[in-house]
Amino acid sequence: MAKRISLTRYLVEQQRVDGLIPGQLRLLLEVVARACKSISHAVNKGALGGVLGSAESENVQGEVQKKLDIIANEVLIEANEWGGHLAGMASEEMDGIYVVPNRYPQGEYLLLFDPLDGSSNIDVNVSIGTIFSVLKMPEDDRGVDAGDFLQKGSQQVAAGYCVYGPQTTLVLTVGDGVAMFTLDREQGSFVLTQEKVRIPADTKEFAINMSNMRHWDEPVKRYIDECLQGKEGPRGKDFNMRWIASMVADVHRIMTRGGIFMYPWDKREPNKPGKLRLMYEANPMAWLVEQAGGAATNGKQRILDIEPTQLHERVSVILGSKNEVERVTSYH
Ligand code: AHG
Ligand code: MN
Ligand code: MN
């Protein structure tokens, strides 16, 4: 029988054999995975668990929160605050940073997350997910503040997402490629199901919300228009389209079979650089995609090189199969 490698064993080996991750980071990742398992159980219960519907509150970005947005946020905080591996956390669902309370030991890591991505899909039973990013506290820093979180994506020490779909799959990088783990519900553990994930450089599949077409900028219009012309057009091949409206699910498809995902800047709110958030959506996804051989830009610049100025700042996102991302970027 092929040996089953649990997430725990995978991380221990990354720590012990390859020296890639320190013990505290291993602990942190195990705790995040445990929290994702709890969220997965809550998602699965659906109406039976009373987790569907709106919470009748708004987050800092003015979005109406769903019950599950809040539940997932609480699960992540409660799981992570007492272990001693973190100094603080930041989340899409919290205005400011969450400093680990004094009654617990302070660690040297910072955890950022989108607790529940794809909120519009919760009530309709379509795949949703959790996205997370791990940074290190700046050296010689006493007392965590929001400024400590404002590090470029290239500074991340771990990043991942968990997709709650037909299967619950955790996808992780610590800078040594991308590994996927599937939740075995009987055993209650994540099991390694794919290592060294590679995104093909070419694709015939794009993901964008086409209803925003009239608001797009010229380079994006040109790229999609060329795809739509298919075999008869300049690309000489037919394209297929997918849009799940859960970034996690769209990125997971790209991780599995390639593709390009775009949520570009558009003219609806010209002062906003985009819809997606840099620190806990774009950065972790950009690093994962790059680690799998893909690319991620905002049209002008590599996402991981963007110097953040605000915790909840937004960004234009183009990511996935390398040759397509480079093409769209060149059109800018
Ligand atoms: P969230 O649910 O965390 O607010 O994120 C939703 C994001 C992203 O997951 C998805 O790609 C996009 O919003 C969908 O936006 P549209 O509804 O505008 O297509
Ligand atoms: Mn999101
Ligand atoms: Mn969210």
Image: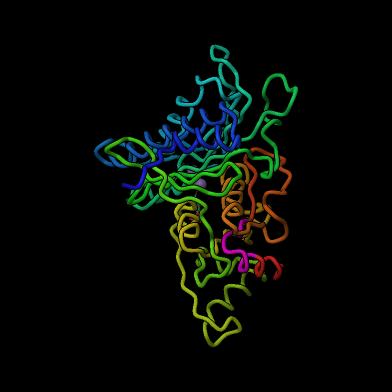
Position of 215 relative to 290 (above/below): below
Position of 45 relative to 26 (above/below): below
Between 77 and 16, the one lying in front of the other is 16
Q: Which residue is at a point 72% across and 48% down the rendered structure image?
A: 306
Give the farthest residue toward the left: 48
Q: Which residue is at a point 33% across and 37% down the rendered structure image?
A: 42
Position of 179 relative to 18 (above/below): below
Image: magenta residue range: 317-325
Question: Picture quarter containing residue 290?
Answer: bottom right
Say whether residue 65 is visible: yes
47 part of magenta stretch: no
Give the farthest residue toward the top: 103
* Quadrant position of the C terminus in the picture: bottom right
Between 87 and 14, the one lying in front of the other is 14
Question: Picture quarter containing residue 16?
Answer: top right
Q: Position of residue 147 (x, y in %)?
A: 71, 31
Question: Picture quarter containing residue 52?
Answer: top left
Give the farthest residue toward the front: 1
Q: Position of residue 209 (x, y in %)?
A: 51, 63
The colour scheme used here is rainbow
Say whether residue 96 is visible: no
Q: Which residue is at a point 49% across and 47% down the rendered structure image?
A: 179
Q: Is residue 182 left or right of residue 285?
A: left
Q: Is residue 224 left or right of residue 140?
A: left
Between 157 and 22, the one lying in front of the other is 22
Q: Position of residue 45 (x, y in %)?
A: 28, 39
Position of 329 relative to 291 (above/below): below
Q: Which residue is at a point 42% across and 37% down the rendered structure image?
A: 36
Q: Position of residue 103 (x, y in %)?
A: 54, 11
